[in-house]
Structures are given as structure tokens and as C-alpha cells.
Amino acid sequence: METKQPNIERLIARKISGDITDDELMQLFAWVENAEENANLYRQLISVMSEQAIQEKKELVWQKTMVKSKLVNRAGSKLVSIFRSREWRVAAMLAVIFLIPLLLGKFGEDGNGNGLMHTVKGEDVTTSFYLPDGSLVVLARGSVIRYSDDYSCANRELELEGKAFLNIKACCVNPVVVKTGRTCTVANSGSINIDYSEDNVDVAVKSGMVAVVDSSKYRIVCPLIKIRPANALNVKVKSPLTNDNLAFDKEKINYSENEGFSKKPMGNECEVFGWKDREMCFHEKSIYHIAKVISQWFGTNVELKGNIDPTARFSGSFQDPDLKFLLEQLFREDIYSFKIKGDNLIIKAQ
């Protein structure tokens, strides 16, 4: 089989740079999915060529740093005699070195050496920002999302730890792909909520359509997966897309390593999506569920003590609640007491 490797190398280079067109991207997809050897070759080429791109960016940063250093030296030519001393020369070199992180801004290589990455962390109940393609992301407290500095309509790849709401802008044929551990969540447009912890992921769809795929079990180069089934693309492999991992409006998919995929109606919309608007909602939930919600919402360690009734259920809706007010509204004084000390909360059944 003829692979036309030089042309493929060109397409991969254009994908890494973010200059690839939609037609070229579909050519690359078709070539990768045509054979296992193509998929393996793609992995090797993308790794090598991404590393070359990273090195070129590092060299560019260094060149800019040296230019700035020379400009500083010229501006301070009247003080040249001072800098002749050994101590000042060392200080000047250290100043140049510390300029490098400033030039890089919030970029940094990820743990796998996959390039220069943006990292955004949820520092409050909600942290909102827009991606370069115009899509809105809302992060929950303590959650982290990463994306490459070449993120564009040709490369809409994200990596998530924790919980995030995404309002995905339909700007091109290439879908947004959110990697969460062993799974990839794929969507072209719409509003979705992804809640990931360890080997469990919940994906709820407010609008649109998503696919959630266990990338370790199928011959897929994630994130080159399509929303459409493989047979619609004339690909001669078993499609990983089934009824259980395709979700539409008001549906929810759960994946766990032990149980696999399951799908069901989304349920109470406020419970799933309310947090993004800083509204805490729950209906007929146990005290253990409430303790988990409080811990995530306020960044607080919650400890339950005493004779806890596991059958007790709680319901409520609170707009941007204060912790003490929330506890007073939820727990009757004759049944529960609570103590707040720093980042620790103790709830004790009487």
C-alpha cells in the first residue's frame, strides 16, 4: 500500500502549526484510519515533529531573551564600568535567565513532553474563560484544564482533571475533544458538563450530541475520533460508537473502569448544571452526598461524626451560599451540630 509519506508529513506539520485546512484535516483522518500501520506511523511522526516544534519555540524564546538583554545593556552603557565587576556580571546573567519564564507567560511543557501548554486552575467556586475558538469553559474549584498553545479550529484538544462546563462554539468541522484519563469526550457543538475523578467520568448533555469513548479498548487514535459511526466514513473497522456512549439533549453518560458505559436521562438540571451559575442544588440526597458537595464547593475538609442516619434525605437550592448560612438552613440544631475551624468542618449527629 502506498502511503505517500512526504505528503502526510506535510499535513502533520500543518496540523501542529494550526494552519491545516478542514479538507486537509479530513485527508489526514482518512489516511490514519485506513490501516493500523498508518496509525502507528502517525503516532511516531506526531511525537517527533511536535518535539521539533517545541525546540524551535524554545530557541525563539532564547533569541528574544538575548535581544532584550542586548537592549538593556545598550540602555545602560553609561554604567558599563560597574558591570565589569564579577558580581554584577553574575547578577546580569541571572536577570537574563529569569526573563525566560516571563516571556513564556503561562506556557509550560506538560508531563509527557507534549509541547507548550496553557494550564488553567479553578481557584473559586467557578472560574470562567474563553478558548481561542470562542468556546466558553467554566471550571469548578480545584479543577484543572490544559490545552496547547496551538489550539485552534484545526486542533481543539483539551485535557481535564475535575469538573468543567463547556459551551462549545460550532466554528469548524473538527470537534472539541476532552481527554479525561482513559476516556475522550467528543462534541462538535452544544453545552455539556464533564465530571471526572480517578477512573470515573460523568458527561451530561444540556444541548447537542457527544460521544464518550474508552480509547484504550479500540483501534482509535484519540483525538482523531469522529462523532459519526465508522461505517458512515467507509472505515472497515468495528465502530466504537454505540447507543451507550452516544448522548443527546438531556441525557447523561457514565463510564467507570469496572462497569464500562451506561446511559440514562440527565435528571434534575439544576443539580447537574446549577453550579456553573453558582447555584447549589440537590434533591433527596444523603448527608454523605451533601458533605461531598460542601467539600467541593467551599474547598473544605468535611468530617462526619456521631450516630449518622444514612436514610436521612436533604433537598434545597441556594444561590451562592455562605457556609454558615447553608449549614443553619440544612441541619436542625436538635439533631446536628457543626464546628468550622479554618478549612475544616465537623458535622456531628446528636
Image (cartoon, grey):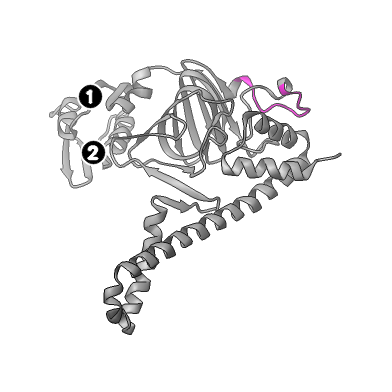
Instruction: Identify the residue at image location x=42%, y=46%.
Output: 119
Question: In the rendered structure, which amino acid carries the disc numbered 1?
Answer: Gln
Q: Is residue 228 above or below residue 164?
A: above
Q: Secondary structure at mark 2?
A: strand
Image location (x, y in percent) of residue 206: 44, 19
Q: Which residues make up the magenta segment?
A: 233-243
243 or 210: which is nearer to us? 210
Q: Which mark is residue 319?
A: 1
Observer-nearest of 81 and 90:
81
Regarding residue 350, the answer to whether it shows in the image is: no
> Dividing the picture into quarters, in which one does residue 299 lie?
top left
The disc, 2 or 1, on the residue closer to the chain's N-terminal end is: 2
Q: Nearer the viewer, mark 2 or mark 1?
A: 1
Q: Which type of secondary structure does the marked residue at label 1 adopt?
A: strand
Q: Residue at x 32, y 39 (%)?
A: 141
Residue 179 percent coordinates (x, y): 53, 38
Residue ID for mark 2: 306
Measured in 3D between alpha carbons, the distance from the residue under mark 2 to the one under mark 1, in whole angstroms, is 29 Å
At 31% from the left and 23% from the top, the residue drawn is: 282
Q: Which is more toward the observer, 311 or 324? A: 324
Crowd rating for badge 2 (residues with CA inside 10 Å; few <14, some 14–19, many 20+): few
Q: Residue furthest left?
A: 333
Is 263 placed left or right of 333 in the picture? right
User: Is the C terminus in the top left, top right, bottom left or bottom right quadrant?
Assistant: top left
At label 2, the amino acid type is Gly
Q: Main secondary structure of the magenta part?
A: loop
Image position of 207 (left or right of 122) = right
56 lies left or right of 126 = right
From what the image shows, is residue 65 above or below residue 273? below
